[in-house]
Image (cartoon, helix red, strand yellow):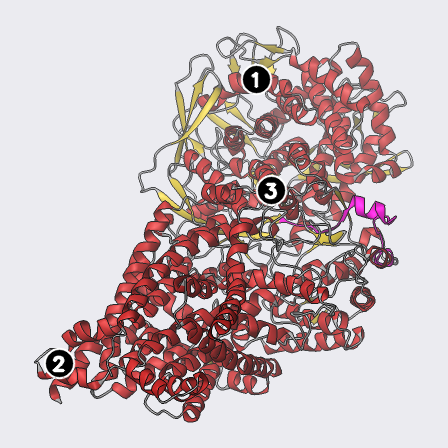
Amino acid sequence: MRAEERSGWLLVAPYASFLLAFALYPIAFALVLVFLHWDLVTTPTFAGVDNVALLAQDTRFWQSVANTFLFLAIHVPLQIVAALALAVALNRQLVFRAFWRAAFFLPVVISGAVVSILWSSLYATDVGLINSLLVRIGLQPVPWLTDPLTAMPAIAAMVTWKNVGFYVIIYLAGLQYIPRSCKEAIEIEGATTWQRFRFLTLPLLLPQTILVVTLSTINGFQLFIEPYVMTGGGPLRRTYSIVLYLYTNAFSYQKMGYAATIGVALALMIGAVILVQRRVLGTGDSL
Amino acid sequence: MRVVARRVCVALAMTPLVYGASCNRQPPRQSSEGASRPVVLSLAHLRHLGIDAKIGERKVRAVSLYAEAPDYRLAGSPARDGYEGVASVDDAARAAVVYLRAYEASGDTRDRTDALGLLSFIASMQTSDGEFVNFIDAHGVQNVKAPSSAKSMSYWAARSIWALGEAERVLGDSVMQQAGLRDVFNSAMGRMELDVLRGQLVGGSATATAEALLGLLAMQRAVPNTAISSLAERTAELLVVLTRGNSATAPWGAHLDSASADWHAWGARTVEALATAAIVLARPDFAVAARHEADALWSRYLVAGRVPALVDAKGDASWYPEIAYGVSPIVGGYLALAAATGESRYAAFAGLTGAWLLGDNAAHIAMYNDSAGRTFDGIDSDTSKAGVKVNRNAGAESTIEGLLALQQLTASPEAAKYLRYTRVGDASASLASLPTAREYAAPDGQRVRISLSDSGAAIHALPNTSAPKTLTYWPAANPSEVRLATLLATRWNAEHPDVQVRVQPLPAGRSSEEVLLAAIVAKATPDVSSNVSSALLARLVRAGGVVRLDDRVATAARLRERTTESMLASLRLPDGGIYAFPWKTNPEMLMYNIDQLKAAGVVPPRTQAELLDALRRLARDTNGDGRNDHWGMWATLKTTWFERFYDFYPLYLANAGGRTLVKNGDVLFENAAAEQAMELLRHAFAEGWLPKSNFALGRDPFADGTVAMKIIGPWFLKELNDLKVPGLRYDVVPVPAVDSVAASRRFAFADLRSIAIFSTTKHPDEAAQFVAYLTSPEADRMLIEEASQLPYRKALAGDARFTRSLALWPTLSTFATYVERTRDLDVDPDVVEIFDVISEAYERGAIYGIVPVKPALAKAAADVRKIIRAR
Amino acid sequence: MKTLGRIALYSLLGVAALTFIYPFLWMASSTLKPPFEVGTLSLIPQHATLDNYRTMWARAPFGRALLNSTLVATTITAAVLVFGSMTAYAMARLNFRGRPLLNAITTAILLVPGQLTLIPLYTLIVQLGWIDTYAALIVPYLFNATAILMLRQFFLQIPQSLVDSARMDGMSEPRILFTIFWPLAKPALAIVAIFTFMGSWNEVLWPLLVVREQHLMTLPQLLTVFALGGGAGSLGVSLAAAMVLVVPVVIAYVFLQRHFIESMAGAGIKG
């Protein structure tokens, strides 16, 4: 065990020292900020628990929390289902498999800002592509991004679309670790495609699913650029995400202390949600 | 002519003389801090000289001829002059010019009152044939006998024309008409025309003719018309031919009354008049004529190290007396040449010449005292003591001419820089045999060398012993501003080898604020940045993060040159200081698509009722699917704070009669003006006259014809030009206000952008010079041409120097008329948050109409008060 | 039945793929449109022009920036693969004191929004004197918590028997990592490589903060600073810039994907 201990430390030593400088210092800095008033320009002043007290009763903040949870509730399940379905489909023997895989990956490599510009055109009420299709089949146009009820779901759908290619490759990589012998075994037993998926593929992909859930939850909590570009947080603040609120406080209102408080609250929230997810998915060690 | 000159000389001879320093004594060293302080203009002594007079039944103001040291008691003309009188039109006219220019800069009504009182005096001295009498005695009786006073079309008449022209330019035509002064001008001009059309100089003198011409040109600037411009052209042509000699031959291009006449420094305003004529009449050939005298003759003064009193036709100079009246016309001439030719060396020469007032003279003392506003009457040679004597009296002429020169010098950064330079070594004794070059030194040891060349004098900064300094400059990163910044920095670097500027563009858009804030935190700010938002600026100032600009020579001068006091008032901080240089502005107007409005039979709306009606009529369904697809205007549904610049805020400002959102911690928008603006938007949204839609990003619905109107600033003109939309014709009108608001009380919204010098700079004075460079007329022209944006500059729309540049962009000259009639964002540290709150009210009250307008605004007001209380 | 299923599968994939490819095509075609046409949803430019690319090149000659970006992104990617897999291996397969803590911190880092740590991190770089150096661009990215967690997740799936037998043969831990784990984890490494390269390649804000000298600017930074102006007239140029950024990543992806598929064909792991 001594050897393993030593190799372990040797291998993680660079990482640990990196963490100290580039991660823990900024995080500690942020934690200190929670107790300060600071506009980035003048000298900070001690705030005690002002920021925390303000956070507790700031309806704008809690609305952004509710908005973000709504986003996650739509985005995370949708993301898993879409990624899994596409991955299973793409894992078959397909002609032009490289093409298909590249196709679904394309939105991932295009910058979020460009994608947001495109989708704001697609979603536009009176001139957008989606609505012109709806009108063509005889429906009323939907003010996707300007109706308080549809704006956040519309953004969630778009983010899911953009990221699915990335999660597809995670699942594809996972699918390769399913030993052929298992597949052959279950095929001999005469299982249907669905049964094979339900009882073999899905359980074996659990580690990937956990990864996808974790990453999409974390990324979802950090929703920022899409509402920033597409809606600015509206309508009626319904797409104001937590990070957008944090950003606005930090860089527009220059309330660094309060922004840090929001940031710490956000980190605690993400941590809590992930713990709950872990409990539900039932694995202790994963992260 | 002789009469006037004598007056100066006699005054000098007759009054008690106080002995000055000897010629060879070194001037006392000033502390570098004092030296970098801008010269303060004080009208105190001129006011002290002011006297009430009664001419007939008319109460007027006049200026006492003399004030004698040491207590500066007022005095009239001495017996030696035949008791000319106590006050003259000569002095009153020029004092009026001083007051008018002071009023133009400060907006101080005292100055206006004084000017009008003096003009009233001038009017009462006019005779029915348009000529003037010069002197009055203590009882207000005109002196019609003395040759220096009798009714004539001569010096005092010429100066009256000058003063009246300036008055028209500064006060405007309606004030002049009301005071009956326009008639006085017209009658004088009519009399002058008789002489000029006969090819005669006014009063037989180039000096008088030049001063009268300056009056005509000021009038032409104010109310252009062909009668004035053709007379001005004829007058200028009379002056052009008076030049004698050339760069090699005496009298070196001087404009002389006749071939045998002397050149005299007092009143040598021919160069100023011709150079100004070149600008106003768009006749570059007049500038060429103006250059003759400046390049050949005046260049010799710079190398000689002093300005002579007289130069005879053979080129022999008489050096004494040295008087303000001999310096001021040359200063004015150089500065007018700098404006006409765009060559900054002339401004530098003006500064070096004007340095006479601050110590670069034979006595090595400051002739102008800037706490009292006095200018001493002169310096003469003292044959008995082999030195010079200083006449410390401060009469009207010296005081006025000192102020006239300094008013101009302190409004030119290039000139003001040299005001405290002094010549190195002894002055030359002859103009004919000069050294090849002369050096001048600043109190901090910097030196420049003036050398003679065929194209006049050249100025070179002597290499500094210290290492070259580097300034970093962060402009905004939109392509046209980067190009502008790079161009200006390249030019600057070529002209200033000692101070090199590095351009590092700030990123455009949202990253800009992050980069700047991070730099501030890390104390890694640049020396200069022209992309500082007003909200951030408010904080920076509070934290001492930026340098004060109105007490540095270069920026103080540029502020004087570019702005009026009323344009600066809202930018002053509680300590009275200006901490960010107001650079460019974007006054918003209502832009409309000419063809769409015509097709719909809608006239461009003037009131908000008409605007609502236009919105109603322009919302229409063109493809017959039952839904509107074209609208009058688009008010974005986005709530990002600055989106309100294009809908609610300009409509509110149009109604609000000058009020903004907050002031000194008070909420100003909880009122009818805001309610009416919001109600208009609510109504239009509720009826579907405004689209409840966000259009595709990066595509402008006005440009593509989806909407017919747009509230927007001039920067958009460049964008429209880049878009090259086929067949789009547009024009602009002021943003409509509710009917009850008078046109004169309507303000446009304009986003003022400033240039700041950060306190982290090691070279604040060099940075200030660079800022002055970035805001020079030349740079401002480039700003207009490159970016279709407007410099924050007084009287921009009527300024001949910018006419061509403004005309490059359709409608830009209309935008330019609004530069001084704007309201900006409040300089409040929480202005962004306040706008976000307004946006919420707009969303709830107008777009979605879930709350009536009044409570929506009331809630916004309450939220804003909470924000203000929390800090 | 089987053919029917195939047809259904292909048409479904086809429709789905179309919605994924469309934006790319839209972007590509928009870069060829003149300003007043940009932003329309049609894929065929009515008045095709190369002006957007010309404008971009004229404003921001990006030869040097391309080099900088390539240098920075490949260095970071290599470092993340080597250091990240070392760390992930230790965290997945070795028992040492502090491992749970390291795990927790690594996750915690992911939870902290970047907007919050931006300014402290920047002040750190200023204090280190790294402004206007490659170090400022590279060093803060040498490790990547997401990459470590991803690799760790995949390393956990590799059978312990392989490790045990390798140890039995006297292999050192690094050798086990690089000769046994790496070949087996090719797909995972490919994902991490793509992910890291892409992230570094597209990063704009950080370079904007730490680099002010043009010769050190990365490609997206240079384009942001010089080519993009904001406003309606510049959308075409913005998209052209995005295009220039996307193409290398797509090429990198296609290249890495082949590795990925080859390793799949081997179906590496025997149960």
Q: Is residue B383 visible?
A: no
Is the residue marked by circle 2 packed among few (<14), some (14-19), or many (20+) residues within 10 Å? some
- Location of the C terminus of chain A (image quadrant): bottom left
- Say what amino acid the circle numbered 3 marks: His
Task: Give the letter of the chain under mark 2.
Answer: C
Secondary structure found at label 1: helix
The Cα atoms of the two marked residues, 2 and 1, are separated by 98 Å
Tags 3 and 1 on a common chain:
no
Q: Which residue is mark 1?
A: B293
Question: Residue at the spot x=66%, y=27% of the render?
Answer: B279
Q: Considering only order in the chain, which callout, 3 or 2, is on the residue closer to the N terminus?
A: 3
The Cα atoms of the two marked residues, 3 and 1, are separated by 59 Å
Task: Give the vertical position of C202 relative to B62 (above or below).
Answer: below
Q: Which residue is mark 2?
A: C166
Eye-nearest disc, 2 or 1? 2
Which is nearer the eye, C115 or B250? C115
- Say what amino acid the circle numbered 1 marks: Glu
Q: Which residues are magenta?
A: B585-612
